[in-house]
Amino acid sequence: MNVNTFSFVEKAAERAREQLILIVDDLPDNLRVLSTALAGQGFQIRCAKSGAIALMAVQTTSPDLILLDIKMPDLDGYEVCQRLKSMELTRDIPVIFLSALDDAFDQVKAFKVGGVDYITKPFHVEEVLIRVRHQLDLQAAKAEIQQLNQELEHRVEQRTAQLAKINEELSLEVIERQHIEESLRVSEERLENILSSLEDVVWSVAADYSQIFYLNSAVEKVYGYSIASFLGNPSFRLQVIHFEDRDRIEDANKAMLATGHLCEEYRILHANGEVRWINDRSHVIYDAEGKPLRINGIVRDITEQKQAQQQLIYDALHDALTGLPNRNLFMDRVEQTLKHSKRHSGYLFAILFIDLDRFKMINDSLGHATGDRFLKAIAQLLESCLRPSDTVARFGGDEFTILIDDIQEPSEAIVIAERILNKFLMPVDLGDQTIFTSASIGIVISTKDYNSGADLLRDADIAMYCAKSLGRGRYILFDSEMYEQNLKLMQLDSDLRYAIERQEFELHYQPFVALATNKLVGFEALIRWRHPERGLVSPTEFIPVAEDSGLIVAIGDWVMHEACQQLRKWQTLFPETTALKMSINLASHQVRESNLIEKLDRVLAATGIVGSSICLEITESTLMDRSELTIDKLRQLRARNIQLSIDDFGQGYSSLGYLRRFPINTLKIDRAFIDRMAADAENLEIVRTIVVLAKTLSMNVVAEGVENQQQVTMLKQLDCKFAQGYFFSRPLPVLALEQAIATKILEI
């Protein structure tokens, strides 16, 4: 190693010891870890616990680099960075963001306000050290270039003075010239080595772009053209700018002669045909009279950074599974379309809100992987039904939304909805699975009364739920009555949440009897809601609301405890009722509860009721929902001697083939079959079949909704053992039922 080289290395080491890093973070642990690690590498460290302190610190001591947190109590990192970049003193200090925020928009914002890098917490100290060294090396290279440039200027001045002296000291001219030339050669060689090692393009050109003074070899990698292509044509660098950016950059270059600097990002056309992004930082060098002499600059290839930013933005606006626009992008397009409609009278558009019927069953029975494949297939199916101008988005879960743009009549939206429903009539083929499904669609047509996209989506959602409540597999066009009804449901839901706390629920009990003797064999507990303003609210009105909101679990738990407690009171009051059964409806939400068995055990223990005294009624659809898990729970219930009954049998799923798998004791024939039994031979045959099936499987049969003697006679002929209905008794409140038992109106 020669003396000059050793001197250069020694200077570089000394420069590293003098480098100051400012760490800005409101967490002491982060300050401690970072300052310890960086100080161990020979850097000087200064810490600030807030953005305000950091801004004060840079006024007295200018750091070489700033590590800046984003989330801080006074000024956040974005504002601190913007203030730093707005001040001449701190404008060129590199800022590396350190943040726990990993959202795409946060990272994009960090780069927009002037950050040079972005490190996500929790960070790795090694990664921080590498990125810090990279930025400091780049700053050092820039400083070295500036210093060497000044040295060259100084050397030229010295050489001029020395040449003037040559006339007097001719004998020293050769020696002096050799010294100067050698020093200049070493300096130029050192500068060239530094510049050649950079990946950024370093250039110097005449102020009028007529001559290129310097260009390093990095230009061949960044632009793809040889250095000769640029040296032979000084304007070539401007010619390879992307045509969409060329005018803007030419205007910026002209303005630079007045402002003295330029910092622009723009596209270039690489020699291989690729479009690449570059960052161009240029500075004008003036003579003593303020006349521009030359322009020096650094060009960096930021293509990968731009692509990463674009990917982050794309990911933030699209659904990862289907690739469709997500809620954010869809709502933005709706808002833009709504603004357009406000400016153009008569412009119409529509929104479709689509919910897949029974998707949860597909997910639970076939697995989430199949569910995801199914959703992707549905996304493609929906796209195939639309025009290129329309937008379909995955709104979340199994919900999709469609923006139908620029329609002449509402019927155009209905045609698309019918096209979608017709597609759903065909099975979805996933290769190894064929799935039949349907969808419920709500449609809303834009009107002048709408001022926000959220209101349009709200009404489309209301219409979709209306379609689902009417039987699914259909579409409904929104009208104002639906909104009013939805407000009523919201009020009902709100009131329902306080009903248990305010003790507004009560139980009525409908007896069921043995048909052979007309004697009482048990009761079915039926909930009633005595609303403080509306009076008795029908269960058919509030039970669906409770199921949708999840309140049905708390209500069902109350019914379970209240019915068992009442049965225990009757067993004490009327000893002859010991053998009577209490039938209690069990909602599907309760069956899905993981602690159902534990809850039931606590109720039986608290009320003193034995398991054989109660019968739990479940619907066919509940049995089929996650059947293996359901079977396991039902077996645990039967192990406690609790009776199990299928309610409304025959109206749900075709589950006859599954009956042997379920530990069921009783089938309750749906009242619709009983009601039409006398007038319809087909219904009579259905009842007969259910009775025979129950006997074959050693099950009991209860006929629901018996209202006249003719039905009683027919049921006896069919050998149906038990029945309940208005013919025997309406559901009665506690006192009325006790009076009926006491006066032998109901005989045990």
Image (spheres, rainbow, N blue to C red):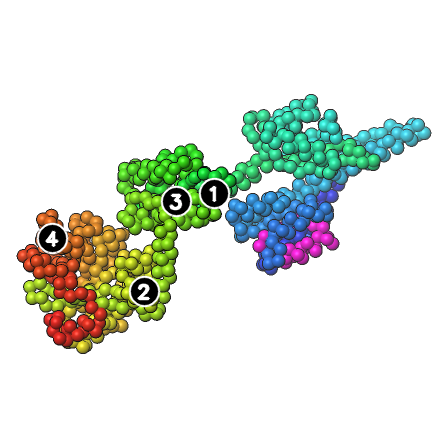
Closer to the chain start, of discs 4 and 1, is 1
Q: CA distance from mark 2 to mark 3?
A: 32 Å
Mark 3 or 4 closer to N-term?
A: 3
Looking at the picture, does residue 587 appear above or below residue 346?
below
Q: Secondary structure at mark 2?
A: loop
* For residue 318, above or below residue 221: below
Question: Left or right: 109 with respect to 319?
Answer: right
Image location of residue 367, percent across then percent down: 32, 47
Alpha carbons under labels 3 and 1: distance apart = 13 Å
Q: Nearer the viewer, residue 519 or 297?
A: 519
SS label for mark 4: loop
Q: Nearer the viewer, mark 4 or mark 1?
A: 1
The residue where tag 1 is placed is 338
The residue wearing badge 4 is: 677
Instruction: Give the mark, 3 or 1, whose residue is nearer the N terminus.
Output: 1
Residue 46 within the segment the image draws in magenta = yes
- The answer to whether mark 3 and mark 1 are in CB contact below 8 A is no
Q: CA distance from mark 4 to mark 1?
A: 56 Å
- Residues rendered magenta in the picture: 45-71
Residue 399 image offset from top left, x and y in percent: 37, 46
Q: Earlier in the sequence, mark 4 or mark 2?
A: 2
Badge 3 element = strand
Instruction: Quickly name the residue at label 3.
Output: 444
Q: Residues within 10 Å of mark 3 (few under 14, many from 20)?
A: many
- Give the number of the mark in front: 3 or 4: 3
Is 156 left, or right, of 102 in this rendering? right
Instruction: Say what amino acid the circle numbered 1 marks.
Output: Leu
The amino acid beneath tag 3 is: Val
Label at residue 271? none
